[in-house]
Structures are given as structure tokens and as C-alpha cells.
Amino acid sequence: MSGHSKWSTIKRAKGAADAKRGQLFTKLAKELIVAVRQGGSSDPEMNFQLRMAIQRAKDSNMPSDSIDRAIKKGSGESSGQEQVSEVFYEGYGPGGTAILLQTFTDNKNRTVSDVRSTFTKCGGNLSEAGAVAWQFEQKGVVVVDSDSDNAEDLALVAIDSGADDFETVEDTIHIYSSPEMLEQIRQSLEDFGASVRSLDLSMLPKNTITLDIKTAKQTLRLMDTLEDLDDVQKVFSNADFPDDVFDQYSNPE
């Protein structure tokens, strides 16, 4: 799971730049619209997926009126309802790494064209549905703040509440579980007094591929470029990046 945590850290480091490019709020709005439709309710108390999407939007400082407007679009309460749908795309990156994309799009032809050209430009190739999806499994991911004094206690609370695994990443603990246990684990951690930094559903690789420096840089470039596409919501990979590449990427000279 280390590949997931490293890529998550990279994305946090570049989050401010995404916001400046004006993409972040658009992606969050699409996530809210899809969450309403998939969860079958515009009430976050009745729709856990929507509740997570709202929290992510708030954490990114998305204005409340923009959040409300997206929720109304998803429920059909406002005019100009957007026909946004969730589509997954699969492909291979440099070194044969598996790449899985979650997209929210209102134009599948545009999206697949953008995705295909990006794969080609960055040394990968778009594949047919089912080519790599079997290498991933959906997991709930809870990220909580921690330090050396409470890390072990937090991990025990998570495991007792149904977590499958965990790992320490800098000043946080990443806790992994089945999607069904995510809310229960979050509640137990908060009752214990933990500071929950984020809550999400992710597609984690069942096995990872360790990359050399050159291939790792190429793969990071591909994943970063894919995630910058307007319709791409999340990028998942089975790549395990060397720490040296991660440091260079996070702290460019």
C-alpha cells in the first residue's frame, strides 16, 4: 500500500497549484453531483458518499453556496441539470505498471480522447475495460493525525473497529478497511479523540511493482498529467516509487 500513500502525499503537496488552475472546485462539484445520484439522496445524513464529498469540498475551501448548487444539480432541484456520469478507464504506464482512472464526465468521447492521447504522450497506452481492474480492490481509507505517543493506540482502536491494515506516513496513520466499515472506524477514532484528516474510498493494488528511478519519474509524469485532465477525478496505480524519486518530486530545485 506504500505506493498509494506516497502518491497521496504528492497530491497534497500540489493541491494548492491545482486550485490556482481553477480545476479543483470543478472536480469537487462533479463529485458532489455523482455522490447525490449514486447515494440516492441529497441528505448527507442519509448518504455517506455525499457526506464524504461535502467534507472534501469544505476541506478545500469550496464556498458553501457552490456546494449547495452542486447538490441541487445532482438531485434535479435546480435547472440546467448536468448529465455527469462515472466512467473508469484502464491502461498501462511505463514499465508495465497498471493504471486505473476514475472519471466524472458529461462527454465520454471527449474524455476517452483526452485520456488516450495523454497515455500515448507519456509513454503508456490505454487498454480495454477489464485489462487491469482485477489488480485493484476498493478500500476505505482513513487518514488521522498521529505522533509517536499515540500512534500505537490509534492503530489498535482502528483494528478493533474493523480495519484491515494500517501504515504510518510522516505525521499521519493511513488506515485501510472494507468500504462497509469506513464509517464505523471513523466514528470510533473520533470518539477516541483522534483528529481525522480525511476519509475516502480508494482502489488499492493487490500487489505493487517496484520501479527504478527512470521508470518511476516517467510514471509520476503520466499520473500527474492524467490527474490534471478536467474529467479525471482520481488516478490509481500499482507502482511503488523509490523514496528518492518522491523527494525529488515533492521538493524540485
Image (cartoon, helix red, strand yellow):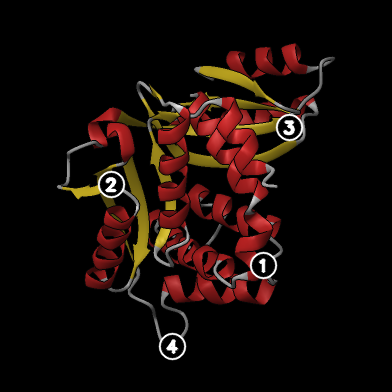
Number of the label disc, if any, that sits on residue 124: 2
* Crowdedness near tag 1: few (<14), some (14–19) or many (≥20) residues, C-alpha within 10 Å: some
Displayed quadrant of residue 99: top left
Horizontal side of 101 relative to 109 (left or right) equals right
Front position among marks 1 and 4: 1
Q: Residues within 10 Å of mark 2 (few under 14, many from 20)?
A: many
Q: CA distance from mark 3 to mark 2?
A: 42 Å
Q: Amino acid at mark 4?
A: Ser
- Mark positioned earlier in the residue sequence (2 or 4): 4
Which SS class for mark 2? loop
| Residue 45 in sight here | no
| Residue at the disc numbered 4 | 79
Foreground pick, 79 / 61: 61
User: Which of the two discs, 3 and 2, sits closer to the camera?
Assistant: 2
Q: Tell me the amino acid under the disc marked 2.
A: Gly
Q: Secondary structure at mark 3?
A: helix
Q: Decide: marks 1, 3 in contact (CB < 8 A)?
A: no
Q: Earlier in the sequence, mark 3 or mark 4?
A: 4
**Residue wearing tag 3:** 190
In the rendering, at what x and y percent does residue 146 appear?
Answer: 77, 25
Q: Determine if residue 67 is in view.
A: yes
Instruction: From the image, tell me which residue sits under label 1.
Output: 62
Q: Is residue 62 above or below residue 97?
A: below
The extreme left residue here reads: 128
Residue 216: x %, y % from top left? 45, 34
125 left or right, relative to 10: left
User: The residue under label 1 is which amino acid type?
Assistant: Met
Is 36 in front, or is 153?
A: 153
Is residue 119 shown above or below 181? below
